[in-house]
Image (spheres, rainbow, N blue to C red):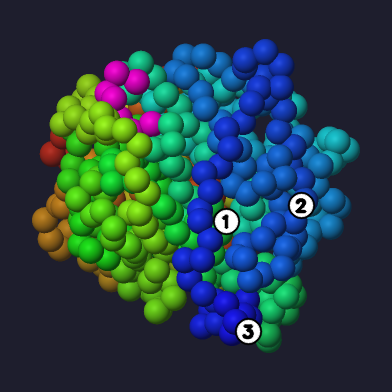
């Protein structure tokens, strides 16, 4: 690294010079089920050639400590906000929930969790340092996670109204690995051979500090202003820029998370090798799947095994072949198969993994037709909307407790969106192209091609799904165990902060809705359920 490194210029940053680190496991504070985790400002070095710089981290590290939980055994976490009163990234005070509120706020969402709404990290349940000021939906200082769901790769992150894009980018994200007896019996790679990988794109200033844009247009009447989406110039893995990982010639399990603000990834290996996919967002698949590439939008996870035994001595790059890449963001990290094998690899990747518990469309009590649309705010800024509504409009998605619903996400925008629904795991039933011009004119859906099944790597349980542009994406889900105030939103963080988020109110009083006929197709953009 004799050549001068300018963190603001990716052409000068050497790749694959530091080994990626596995995040440490969180330890209980009291007993075996109570944790206190501090949210605080700290210094971090993203690359050996960079100076240490300001970030925010859970327990002062990024990613935060990995919480390991067991199915059915509850955990309590007190997320202690020790952040300063001023943010180090540009604050847009015109966003809903930002005007008149403290500049720095925090609340933690356990993404993918089946949890009571008061512990879900509602975006208006934020609080400041030492709970001096709290948001209108703040209810509890200690979050309880009952873990009533199958083993899965979950993650926790900041979810503060109008600040999520900045707080996650600052470093507030970590893994939550839920395990159960079914998974433990499978003899998958574990211990040092199971590694969570959090992937985020970032840009830097010349001094090595984090760069985040303060406006999309210098002529806007708002400054600082939110941007439509942030794409960084470098790729970090577990908060290290283009790292490497030394591995033995054996099987490794990787929990891969796209924690970027906006960037989409299409992952493959530089040697054209394959992955054994064993899980999606919501847990293990019924059967393992061998794939050569897979796509992840923000918040999506992939649980997979790579068998390095046949690649001894090789250096293999994990690539991002998504269209929106350059020569730098095409590279993610490097695997170096140069460690000696420490004993026989007795781990397995069985063909059968987990019992199949499918939902079927004929079970649905309610079908909803929910369009994604483009609009402009009062300052002339581009914004995306869910069902033509903003965050503060009254709740229209009110599923009944123990009901099964089908949501048709009608994407009438020019870009794909990762749609996340709190509380539930769902299945992607299909996607189908429609006549966008006719829909915009009349609100009617005219399908223009056959339905497409979920992609091979999307077959399992999901809590975040890609809603392709010009397609109706059909999701099925079961609302159970909990009632209360949840949300659904686009997980592009700039979109989420700019009102592409809506309330979901799960209610106890079931309303009489006849199950729709399985051959019935949506005809309008309106919600087919009762609003009661």
| Front residue of 371 and 175 | 175
Label 3 sits on a secondary structure element that is loop
Question: Residue 165, percent across and down?
Answer: 61, 57
**Residue behind mark 1:** 239
- Check disc 3 and report the residue beneath it: 4
Question: Which residue is located at x 40 percent, y 78 percent?
Answer: 326
Residue in view at x 68 percent, y 42 percent: 58
Which residues, given as a range, are shown in magenta?
A: 184-190
Q: Earlier in the sequence, mark 2 or mark 3?
A: 3
Place of residue 496 in the rendered image (x, y in percent of width and height, measured from the top left): 55, 55
Distance Cα–Cα, label 1 vs label 2: 13 Å
Task: Find numbered disc 1 in the image and state the secondary structure of the residue it sits on.
Answer: loop
Q: Main secondary structure of the magenta part?
A: loop
The residue labelled by disc 2 is 42
Left or right: residue 218 versus residue 257 is right
Q: Which residue is painted at 27% across and 37% down in the image?
A: 278
Q: Which mark is residue 125?
A: none
Q: Few, some or many C-alpha atoms within 10 Å of disc 1 (few <14, some 14-19, many ≥20)?
A: many
Q: Is residue 10 visible?
A: yes
């Amino acid at each position: 690294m004799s050549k001068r490194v300018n963190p603001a210029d990716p052409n000068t940053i050497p790749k694959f010079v530091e080994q990626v680190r596995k995040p440490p496991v969180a330890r209980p504070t009291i007993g075996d089920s109570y944790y206190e985790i501090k949210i605080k400002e700290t210094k971090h070095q993203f690359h050996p050639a960079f100076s240490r710089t300001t970030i925010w981290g859970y327990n002062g590290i990024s990613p935060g400590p990995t919480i390991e939980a067991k199915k059915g055994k509850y955990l309590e976490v007190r997320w202690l906000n020790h952040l300063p009163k001023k943010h180090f990234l540009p604050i847009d005070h015109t966003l809903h929930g930002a005007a008149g509120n403290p500049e720095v706020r925090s609340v933690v969402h356990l993404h993918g969790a089946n949890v009571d709404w008061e512990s879900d990290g509602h975006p208006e349940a934020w609080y400041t340092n030492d709970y001096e000021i709290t948001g209108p939906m703040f209810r509890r200082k200690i979050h309880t996670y009952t873990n009533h769901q199958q083993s899965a790769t979950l993650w926790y992150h900041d979810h503060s109204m109008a600040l999520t894009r900045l707080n996650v980018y600052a470093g507030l994200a970590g893994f939550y690995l839920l395990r159960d007896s079914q998974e433990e019996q499978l003899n998958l790679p574990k211990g040092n051979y199971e590694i969570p990988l959090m992937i985020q794109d970032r840009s830097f200033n010349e001094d090595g500090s984090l760069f985040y844009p303060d406006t999309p247009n210098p002529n806007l009447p708002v400054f600082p202003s939110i941007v439509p989406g942030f794409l960084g110039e470098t790729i970090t893995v577990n908060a290290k820029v283009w790292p490497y990982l030394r591995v033995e010639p054996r099987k490794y399990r990787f929990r891969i998370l796209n924690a970027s603000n906006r960037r989409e990834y299409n992952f493959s290996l530089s040697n054209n090798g394959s992955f054994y996919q064993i899980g999606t967002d919501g847990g293990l698949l019924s059967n393992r799947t061998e794939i050569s590439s897979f796509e992840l939008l923000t918040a999506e996870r992939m649980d997979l095994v790579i068998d390095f035994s046949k690649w001894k001595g090789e250096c293999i790059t994990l690539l991002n072949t998504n269209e929106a890449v350059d020569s730098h963001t095409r590279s993610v990290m490097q695997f170096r198969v140069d460690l000696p094998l420490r004993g026989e690899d007795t781990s397995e990747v069985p063909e059968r993994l987990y019992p199949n518990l499918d939902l079927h469309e004929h079970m649905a009590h309610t079908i909803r037709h929910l369009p994604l649309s483009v609009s402009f705010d009062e300052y002339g800024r581009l914004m995306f909307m869910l069902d033509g509504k903003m965050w503060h409009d009254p709740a229209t998605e009110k599923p009944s407790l123990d009901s099964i619903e089908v949501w048709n996400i009608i994407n009438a925008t020019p870009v794909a969106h990762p749609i996340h629904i709190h509380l539930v795991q769902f299945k992607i039933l299909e996607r189908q192209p429609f006549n966008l011009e006719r829909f915009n004119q009349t609100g009617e859906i005219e399908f223009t091609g056959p339905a497409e099944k979920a992609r091979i790597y999307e077959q399992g349980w999901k809590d975040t799904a890609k809603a392709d542009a010009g397609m109706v994406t059909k999701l099925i889900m079961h609302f159970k165990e909990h009632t209360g105030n949840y949300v659904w939103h686009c997980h592009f963080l700039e979109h989420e902060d700019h009102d592409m988020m809506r309330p979901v109110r799960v209610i106890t009083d079931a309303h009489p809705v006849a199950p729709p006929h399985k051959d019935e197709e949506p005809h309008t953009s309106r919600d087919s359920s009762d609003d009661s």
